[in-house]
Amino acid sequence: MTEKAHIDYGALVGWTSSWVDGRLALRVQSVTKPPPHDKQDVHTHVYLMDRNQAAQLANFLFEMGDHSKPDTGGRKLLKRLFG
């Protein structure tokens, strides 16, 4: 890293993701001024991460939002049947 780090600030206004060659491509859009926004006000950044980095980011966001990871396992049926 350089001596002076470049830091962007903005409000998150959108995101998309896709898998590219086994990596997650996270496309994040932000703005730096209040609405109404023009196309040129929206800044787009693309971050590539491996599955481990994506899982760490997801866990961090769940914890910061005071939420738990969604239950998507095969135990849902057992939970419904047996409480």
Image (cartoon, helix red, strand yellow):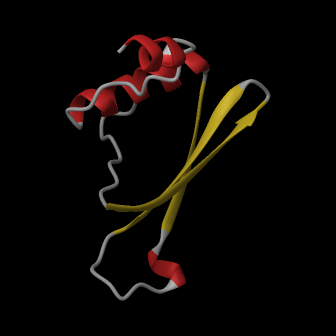
* Residue positioned most to the right: 21
Residue 68 quadrant:
top left
Q: Residue at x 49, y 11 (%)?
A: 78
Q: Is 79 on the left-hand or right-hand side of 5?
A: right
The N terminus lies in quadrant: top left
Q: Residue at x 23, y 38 (%)?
A: 65
Closest to the observer: 27 or 64?
Answer: 64
* Residue positioned most to the front: 81
Closest to the observer: 63 or 83?
Answer: 83
Instruction: Tell how many labels.
Output: 0
The x and y percentages for residue 43 are: 48, 66
Q: Is 80 on the left-hand or right-hand side of 11?
A: right
Q: Residue at x 53, y 18 (%)?
A: 77
The x and y percentages for residue 39 are: 53, 82
The x and y percentages for residue 67 are: 26, 32
Closest to the observer: 31 or 82?
Answer: 82
Q: Please determine whether, in this image, residue 7 is positioned above or below residue 74.
A: below
Q: Is 32 on the left-hand or right-hand side of 72?
A: left
Q: Is 56 on the left-hand or right-hand side of 64?
A: right
Q: Please determine whether, in this image, residue 18 is positioned above or below residue 39.
A: above
Closest to the observer: 70 or 21?
Answer: 70
The C terminus lies in quadrant: top left
Q: Residue at x 40, y 11 (%)?
A: 82
The x and y percentages for residue 76 are: 49, 19
